[in-house]
Each structure stands twice: as structure tokens, then as C-alpha cells.
Amino acid sequence: MASFVAASRVALKFLQLPSTGFLAPCLQNAAILNQQQVRHRRTKHWDPKWKRLRKAKVIKMDIPNLNERAEDLSQEQMKTRMKERGILPPRPWLERPFYISCTGGVFEPYVPPEGDGRMSLVSREGAKQKIEQLEKKTKSMMAIRKIRSYDEDFEPPEFAALAQDLYIRAHQTLCEKNKYKLREIVTERAYPELMHNVADKTIHWQFLKSLEPPRVVHARCTDVISKENIFAQVTVRFHSQQTLAIYDRFGRLMHGSETLTKDCLEYVVFEKHLANEYGVWRLHEKIIPDWMPPKAPAFITYRVDDEPAPVAAESEESKEAVPANESTKTEAAATA
């Protein structure tokens, strides 16, 4: 028995793998891996110490039924599916982002006194108007103080001169029909009103002189949506001489004249977004008082046909078709 064990040991000694020191470096790692235990798909893990934790790593999932359509489910079944999957019910998205660059109108518009520009301070009506303006000046002074809290350099006399330059530039740009430059001078509310019915027309406008210096007559401030979003509106009175002539696409005069000067009394509202650091003053609207006379209508042109009208031809034929006896009767009646 002892001899058999010794013979088996000698046989195992000869069956051992060769030493890895005589192999190439790329084959040494392969030989070491062959000597170690390798885990295959059919074998169990060699270390059962973390078996319970490895089991907890597996998560059982409910595979959704892809053949199920939402149209075939009732409302209760749909609610159950959404609760199981943790999905919130959809809601209609009605909100839209918007940007408020100007107000939609004139808040607390200025009411011009009747007869302004014609009555002097010496007359009774002119003095009465001056007293009424002083009474309404309190709110304007408070609004000017609010504007100065955002713009320290704001002064009504200086702003009136700036407003006159903006007024002239806006009308000159309108005559040139420069849409992109006009958007920088007027607000988004005034732009469509200025560009309405301007196509296919030629406008000749000229600012001659100011009969009275422009002055600030009204100022108001308001907030939109939030108290920090403040807009300011200042009404400036212009009394000037201007010329205006409008031609249609055929070069025919529709309104005004290039040689006839007219005195124009206007109340123009300028607006600025005070909350915006880069806000600028822009032309917003023009106030037209109720007592101001209506403007003259445009000249309407008609097409003149060379051929005579058919009604006139029918009347001539009817005269020729009158019998002779009837004509003599009419002549006798006329002499009688």
C-alpha cells in the first residue's frame, strides 16, 4: 500500500504544470488564471458570504402590456394604471410667455381745455383755464418725483425739447417708411396706428417752426402686474406750423398741400418703461380733444369714361320716337 501511494505521488509530480517563470509575460497571466477557480454560468458563486445581499439586488418589475391601447381603457382603468405607475394626470397648458414693453393705452389721459391756443391769459376764459391747470398739477408733480427716483436727470423743460426731437424724427421716419427705425422711436401700440393705410402713398411733411415752446402739461406713473414694474407717461403740448401733403400711388394729391402752412396744436403722449434699465422715451399716442374741429376729408377721384352713358342715349331715342301729332299738341299747349 505504501508503495502505491509513493508511486502516485511521483506520477502527480510529473503531471504538474511547468513553472510560469519560463513562459512569456503574456502567457504567465493565462497560466495563473487557469490555476484559479473560474465562475461559469452553470456553477454557483464560490463565496456564499454575501448571498442574501446579492439576492436583494434583483428587482422584480412588472412589464407593461404593450398591446394595451389607451383608447380601449375606461376612465377608471386609466386612473388605476396611472396610480400604479406613479404618473400625474395631464393638465391643459394655457400659460404663454409674454413680454410687456409698453402699456395698452393712456392711463388718466390729459383733457385739454377748450379754446387752448386761441385764448390769451388776459381774457377771462384763458385765466380760468390757467387756474384749472394749477389745481391739477399736484398729481403731475408726484409723478415727476417718481420718475426722478429712477432717472435723476429728468427735468420737464429739457424733456420737452427732447420730446420735440422725437416727434420730428418719428414723422420724418414715417415719410421715409423706414419700419425698423420707426420701431425704436414709437411704442408697439403706436406703430400699427402710424403704419395703417400708409402703403402705396407718398407723404411730404415738414416741421417749419414752433409758435410756442413745447411744455409738459401732464405726467402719470402706474404699475403693471407687479408693483416694481412701473411705466411713466408724459403728455407734451406742441403748438407749431407744419405742411403736409399726401399723394396716392398715381401721384394725385389726396390731402393737404406742400405750400399751405397750417398751425397745429397737438398733445402727444410719450412713454418709458422705468423698471427697465435700458428703457427709453418713445412716442405712444396723440390725444385729440372733443372740441377740436374734424379734419378735411381726402379728395376722392373718379374714373371718367370716354363713351357716353347709355341712359342719355335712350333719352335721345325716346325723343325722336315721339309722333308728330303729339308734338303739335304739346306746342299748342305751351302757347296756350
Image: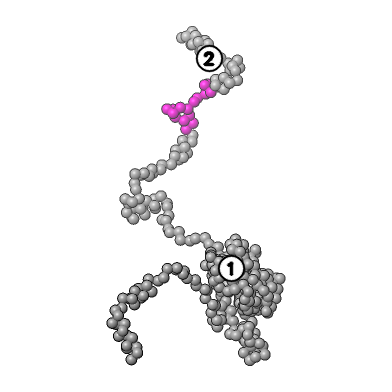
Residue 267 at x, y percent in the picture? 61, 77
Between 332 and 263, the one nearer to me in the picture = 332
Please say if 109 is above or below 303: below
Marks 2/1: CA–CA distance: 110 Å
Which amino acid type is marked by label 2? Answer: Gln
Q: Secondary structure at mark 2?
A: loop
Labels in figure, total:
2
Residue 178 at x, y percent in the picture? 60, 62
Can you tell which mark lies on residue 203?
Answer: 1
Q: Residue furthest top?
A: 3
Residue 47 at x, y percent in the picture? 49, 31
- The residue indicated by pointer 2 is 16
Residue located at (50% from left, 72% from top) = 300
Say left or right for 333 vs 280. Answer: left
Which region shows up in magenta? 33-48
Which amino acid type is marked by label 1? Answer: Ile
Give the image's coloring scheme. Answer: one colour
